[in-house]
Amino acid sequence: MFSISNLVSGYGQSQILHELNLDVAKREIVAVMGRNGMGKTTLFKSLMGVLPAWGGQICIDGVEVSKLDTHQRVENGIAYVPQGRMIFPSMSVLENIQTGLPASAKGKVPDDLYALFPVLHEMRGRKGGNLSGGQQQQLAIARALATNPKVLLLDEPTEGIQPSIIKDIARSLKEIRNLRDLTIIVSEQVLSFTMEIADRFLVIEKGKFVVEESRDKVDEASISRYLSV
Ligand SMILES: Nc1ncnc2c1ncn2[C@@H]1O[C@H](COP(=O)(O)OP(=O)(O)OP(=O)(O)O)[C@@H](O)[C@H]1O
């Protein structure tokens, strides 16, 4: 469904991603785990076209998107929840979600989005900056889902969020996958969170995938060793 082949990218002269390959099935949730600085954000920025790839291919449902601009990639079905959430603090919750809607929606937020995150409906008139960290994360996910993606990329969604809310986010993501047949790639350092949701685990080290294990064979101890400093 979503495939990356020989993806190479970096900044200036420094190569960060080294020929990454990954195939993700429809409805599959894949966790990309790794310590700070290993290349998770660089991978997502390259997939979105925020950072140009130096080489390789990215395909969504058989359509090659690696030469397209970011907005064209979004039209082809990929959406991104960046690290730090990046919601617009002085815009209302409703306006934040509307920034993700296609023009054809005429500003109307689909009911299923509010059904997934009822708190966003209650708070739709509030400024995004006044929400808690967990609510902002839900808002960032809702804004990404407003584009009606096939593939959702989430960069460290649990960062700075309370453990009780992390469980809610895990539950919502599984529900969204089931409701929308969504493919999800999530980067994380928190193994307890990805153990709740992921079907497959990859570890990234210095821009290369060094471990790949499916849910039924996952060795938590060995993945933890890669995550500890
Ligand atoms: N704008 C930039 N210019 C130059 N080098 C960068 C830039 N952004 C990141 N890097 C370098 O690229 C490497 C990978 O960084 P990246 O942000 O992808 O890591 P990460 O795994 O997402 O970690 P984190 O959790 O800290 O975001 C690091 O060595 C980092 O220093």
Image (tube, rainbow, N blue to C red):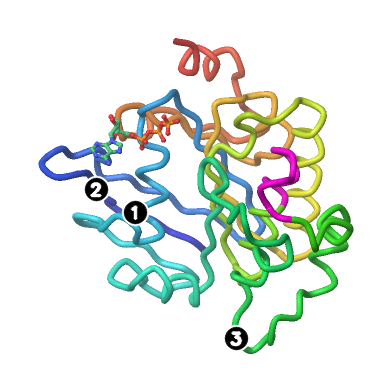
Q: Is mark 1 within 8 Å of ligand 1?
A: no
Quadrant (top left/top right/bottom left/bottom right) for the C terminus? top left
Dots 1 and 2: beta carbons under 8 Å?
Answer: yes
Most foreground residue, 10 or 89: 89
Q: What is the secondary structure assignment of the residue under circle 1? A: helix
Rendering coords of residue 10 (x, y %): 22, 44
- To which residue does mark 2 refer? 9
Other residues around mark 1 within 10 Å, as few (<14) / some (14–19) / many (≥20)? many
Other residues around mark 3 within 10 Å, as few (<14) / some (14–19) / many (≥20)? few
- To which residue does mark 3 refer? 103
Give the magenta-colored segment's residue range: 127-138
Quadrant housing residue 156: top right
Tag 1: amino acid = Ser
Relative side of 91 to 48, left or right: right
Q: Is residue 136 a member of the stretch shown in magenta?
A: yes
- To which residue does mark 1 refer? 46
Residue drawn at x 83%, y 56% is 123
Q: What is the secondary structure assignment of the residue under circle 3? A: helix
Q: How far apart are marks 1 and 2 (CA)?
A: 7 Å
